Image (spheres, coloured by chain):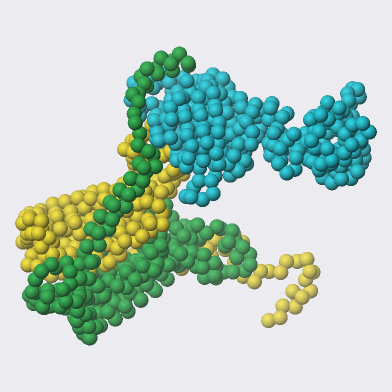
Amino acid sequence: MAQVSLRNIVKAFDGGEPVVKGINLEISDEEFVVLVGPSGCGKTTTLRMVAGLEELTSGEIWIGGDLVNDVPPRDRDIAMVFQNYALYPHMTVFENMAFGLKLRRFPREEIKRRVTEAARILDLGGLLDRKPRALSGGQRQRVAMGRAIVRNPKVFLFDEPLSNLDAKLRVQMRTEIKRVHQTVRTTTIYVTHDQVEAMTLADRVVVMNRGKIEQVGTPHELYHHPRTRFVAEFIGSPAMNFIPCRVIKEAESWALRLSDGVTLPIPRERVERYATFKERNVLLGIRPEHVSNHKPDGRTGIAQLNVKLEVTEPLGMETLVYFQLGGVEVCGRVEPHAAASAGQVMPIAIDLNHMHLIDPETELVM
Amino acid sequence: MADSTSLSLPATQAIPARRSGGGLKGVLRRRAIVGALMTAPLIALLGGLVAYPAVYAIYLSLLSRNMTHFVGFHNFILLLRRDTFHMVVFQSALFAVTAVIFKAVIGFTLAHLMHNVPSRRQRVFRGLLLLPWVIPLALSTLGWWWLFEPTSSALNWLLVRIGLPPQDWLGDPWTARFCMILVNTWWGEPFFMIMYLAALKSVPEQLFEAAAIDGASAWQKLRYVTLPMMRNIISLTMLFSLIVTFANFDIVRILTNGGPVNTTHIFATYAFQVGIQSGDIPLGAAVSLFMLPVLAISSFFVLRGISRRSQEAM
Amino acid sequence: MQKVLAAAEAIEAKPRRRYRSLSRQRRWALYGSYAALAVFVVMFLVPPFYMLITSLKSSAEISGQVGNPWIVHHPTLENFVYLINYAPFRRYFLNTVWVTACVVVISMVISILAAFGLSRIRFWGSELLATGVFFTYLVPESLLFIPLFQILSKLGLINNTWALVLVFPTLAVPFCTWIMIGYFSSIPKELDEAALIDGAGWFQILLRIFIPVAMPGIIAATIFAFTISWGDFLYPLAYLYTSDQMVLNVGIIGDLVRGDVYMWGKIMAAALMAAAPPVIVYVFLMDYYVAGLTAGATKG
């Protein structure tokens, strides 16, 4: 069994400000967990602590039921794929992958079997005799992964492995990694700053910010039910819109009044939830796909208004439109045929069934 | 001389450039001339005072003692028959090889120790450990000579205190050899340490981390990561040092001047004694020339190693 | 894959081990390194230290040999005073200074010009010449001193400090040129091109652009030239005979050993004073020193 357990992990370098401020995380066997967040949030440091490359200031790390705080990396039964691949330049691809096994005195036939099997999984068959400098970036990446696979460790650790690849290759390799995980079902901890990678690869995503965990959940949960403003803003591209407004009473129900006078009615089902925030200033969070052109399908909870477009970005399958609303720039995604040009006015429908209200003080989503 | 026609030229016509040498050929020729001028002093110096003397040495070695007539290889054969000269060959080889190996091992160890220490302290240690190299060799050898001086050696004083017998450091051939190697190791080690430390620092830290995760112990990291990555520098510095140590003069001259009884002469000191002190220039030249094979082979490998390093894009 | 790996897992089964705290292991390694380094430092500094000790002893104390020779029982500066007042010693010092100054200037001029020519102005044979320069660096003085003796005799320069001024550059120029080529090569070509367009000639480019930008390399090379010509022993020993022409290294040994009497105290004091300039340069410019050392064999 290869569960990983992080209990109250704290890390401070040389007695300065803690970079990791109390991380608690339980990872199940065979799970693919992604640590995502902006640079400096502590995700790589956390990963390195799991690997044993950094010492903990306090806290406990458990791998497969063993407390490994004092266990050196070589005895933790883990494998790591580095951002810069860290392949041994003087060894061939085969030797690179076989190195860990050779150190553990595996018999030669066993090593050969494992390496060829991993090479098959990663499509490295013809490259086994080459040295790293004769390989492309993507090939080196796969060799680094092969080196991890042959060890059959309890945990795979990935440290931003795709950052050094160009955009197209990155997409390709992302699928590779996912495919490999489906074949070799090893517990994986993957660190990245790219939320797209996080969303596409993870069973569960851990959003980190400034040394703390903001939220842990499946990609679906994080996308549709973010719990903090940071998560709401970080996940999803283009990012969620945030419009300052005030909860006011209107007719028999409640509505949101924006700074430019526009009023958006709150859907009836939601009124209960926001009961405590009546007459308060809050932030309205609404994703661009819910700010679109009007589609006559008779649904309720849709607010319609005319806005003057500032910028349009035609993407082919949709057009992104930018306009001012409530004092901020708002982004919407409209069908190409319905989009007006920049400078023109067009009708916009905001689907408030998917709205989020954020308390500006606590930055929590209600 | 007034060129009245130029004034009436239409404005669109190009005004000829101030500098002469129009066309590509002129530019190239000028480059070559400037280049030649700049390197001329170098060529003159090295040609006249290095290349020419080297060839001249060969010519000299073929002359008779009073340099009046040509005697072919007589000098060389004479040397090969002399017992003293056999000692010289043996001694030079022993001295050079042993000293280089010691220097490499100690330099390598020191580089590793330094690498373990945080960089602020590294500077301090580096500063102190580099001192043997900085003091002119002749002068520091004087200090060593004083330490080895039989009648009042401070080292002997220490030995006696521990209960060991005092040594006749420079009087006994084998201890004298040991002393020479010791002084040379002491003097040359900083060079090795600095070179190896630089090479060690250039090995990416992530390789060591990857090796740690792969399961390597400290010794295995050394064997599988450090040594292969440093292989180039290690051999280059050793070859380089071999050349310099082989041709060393100061240490032997000051410590023993070849004594006792010519048992510790190396090529340089023997050539000096034979050529300058005894006045037999051709014979001295012949002695020096015996160094040529070893120097030539080592130089070849050094040059090859360096050009390989500049090609290897790691 | 699963079956293969699972079957082989039996091979991997390891007995459980107890581990000492990681941080404590790393701390022990650090202390051990410090200790070992300290031992080496002590061993390495023993000779200079002893030289210093001896230079502070009176001749009586040295010949008396009473007690621990590693400490000074009656410290005195008489050796230093003697040397400062001793005219021949002053002569040696001045000669050395004069020779070194000339050699440094000459070597640097030749090296910088040649390095500029070889690294920037690509003309036929420049590659070959650059390799040739490095090759001459490998030719040792113990090979050349005898033919040079003949040459200098014919030029009438035996027993004349000018002989050194002529010959020492051969020791410094190859390496200095090599260092400078390395530094000059790292200056981007765009700089020269911009200067050419601005109307500068080659010489101005050298003077106003290359030298300022490559100053660290120039300092390192100058230090090297200085150290080499200050400390050389073989050539002076071979070519200089009378006191008035001698330089420090030879003068000390030749002069302060009178017959069978070795005036050790004075010899050590003289050696220290002679070693002082290079050491002082080193103390203040250590980084350039090290840069010069590593530039030789690591730069391509």
The picture places residue A46, in percent across and down from the top left corner, at 52, 37
Q: Residue at x 44, y 18 (%)?
A: C5
Total number of numbered labels?
Answer: 0
Q: Is residue C289 at least partly visible in the picture?
A: yes
Residue A223 x, y percent position in the rendering: 71, 30
Residue A165 shows up from this direction: no
Q: Which chain is green?
A: C
Determine whether, in the image, residue A287 is placed left or right of residue B261: right
Residue in view at x 94 percent, y 33 percent: A251
**Horizontally, is C4 left or right of C163 in the view?**
right
The furthest residue to the front = A276
- Give above or below for C140 relative to A6: below
Against A277, residue B278 (above or below) is below
**The C terminus of chain A lies in quadrant:** top right
Q: Is residue B292 left or right of residue B278?
A: right
Per the rendering, the colour in which chain A appears is cyan
* A257, B149: nearer the viewer: A257
Q: Position of residue C153 (x, y in %)?
A: 22, 75
Q: Residue at x 50, y 61 (%)?
A: C121
Q: Is residue B124 left or right of residue B135?
A: right
Question: Within the image, what quadrant is residue C141 found in?
Answer: bottom left
Q: Residue at x 43, y 55 (%)?
A: C127
Q: Position of residue A226 (x, y in %)?
A: 70, 32
In front of the other: B151 or C194: B151
* Above/below status of C250 relative to C214: below
Q: What tint does the image give chain B?
A: yellow
Most foreground residue, A215 or A158: A215
